[in-house]
Amino acid sequence: MVLIPSIYYTRSPNTEQKRDREHQPKSLVIVAIIATVLLWASAFPAIRVALEAYTPAEVALLRYIVASAVLIVYALIKRIPLPRWQDLPLIVLCGFIGFTVYNFMLNAGQMTVSAGIASFIISSEVGIIALLAWLFFGERLGRLGWIGVVLCIAGVGIIAVGKDGTFQLSLGVLRVFMATLAISVYSIIQKPLLVRYSPIHFTTYAIWSGTLFLFFLAPEAVSSAVRAPIAPTLAVIYMGLFPGVVAYIAWSYVLSRIPASQAGSYLALIPVVALFLAWLWLGEIPTLSALLGGAMVLAGVMLVNRRRI
C-alpha cells in the first residue's frame, strides 16, 4: 500500500479543476451508481445459492471465468490495447485484492453468515474508503460527512448484535470483514489508474489478473460445474455477467468521475437493497436490529451526500 500516494498519482491544477467541476454527479454517474448498488446487492443472495453446490473458491473462480470470457470477446472486438508495463504491478495488485481476496473471503464468510448480514458488514467500507481517501488523496467530507460515516459504521455494529444482545464476532464475520478491507483498498488504489485508462479497460485488466490467481485456489472448479445442479450454476453465471462485469465497470466509471469518499458513501445503500432481495429470493427474515441498523446506514448516506447530490 506504500505505492499509493505519489508514485502512481500526481495532481495538476487542470486535474484539480476538472475534479471540482465533476463533484456534482451527472445523470450517467447516477445511473452507474444505481446499477452498481442493485447488482452488487443481488450478488449476496446469489452467493448463498451458488454455495449450495460449490466451495467458496469454486464460486469465485467460475464467476470470473464467465466474466473473463465475456471481456475477452469484448477486447477482441474493440481491440483493447495492452496496459503499459509500468502500470502492470498496480493492475495485478488491484486484481488480486479486488477480485481474488475479496471474492474468496466473502464467499467463505457467507458459508455461515446470511446474505443480509454479510451485506451490512461489507457496507462498513464506506468509512474505510473515506479514511483512505483522506489519508492518500486529501479528500475531505466535512463535519456532517464524518457524522454520516460514523452513523453508517454504527448501523453495521447494530446489525452484528445477536438476539441475546452480544456482539457476534464469528469466523464467518471476520472473513466478511476481511473482504470489506480488500474491496476498500481496491477502490482506492485503482484511482491513479483511472487517470490513464477507461473504466472498462481497467476493469478488464483487473478481472483477468484476479481470475489467474483464483485458478490456484480451485483447480477442480470446472469438473464440479459438470456435476452441479442447474440453479447454483445459473447463479454463478449471473454473478459473472452482472455483479462481476457490469457492476465493476459501472463502479470504476463512478470513481473516475467523483471523489472516492463521495462514491464510497453510496455503497452503504447496498445492504438495504440486499436485505430486501434476500427476503424475496431466499426468504431471509430481517431482525429488528437489522432494520434499525439499515435505517442508520441510510441516514448516514444522506448526511455524507447532503451537499453533493
Image (spheres, helix red, strand yellow):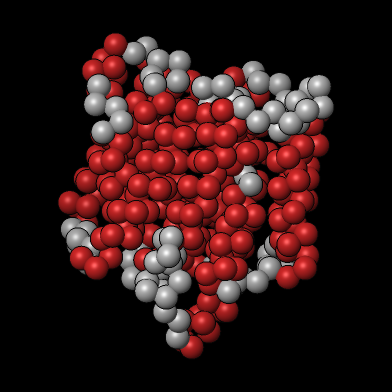
Residue furthest to the bottom: 13
- Closer-to-camera residue (27/49): 49
Q: Is residue 23 left or right of residue 99?
A: right
Q: Is residue 21 above or below residue 280?
A: below
- Closer-to-camera residue (202/150): 150
- Closer-to-camera residue (21/160): 160
Image x and y of residue 120, in percent: 65, 38
- Closer-to-camera residue (164/56): 164
Q: Is residue 51 above or below residue 264?
A: above
* Residue at 63% from the left image edge and 47% from the top image edge: 124
* Residue at 63% from the left image edge and 39% from the top image edge: 121
Q: Is residue 112 left or right of residue 194?
A: right
Image x and y of residue 47, in percent: 48, 27
Identify the image quadrant of residue 66. Answer: top left
Q: Is residue 166 above or below residue 212?
A: above
* Residue at 37% from the left image edge and 71% from the top image edge: 8
The N terminus sits in image quarter: bottom left
Image x and y of residue 89, in percent: 28, 60
Q: Is residue 243 visible?
A: yes
Q: Is residue 42 visible?
A: no
* Residue at 37% from the left image edge and 28% from the top image edge: 57
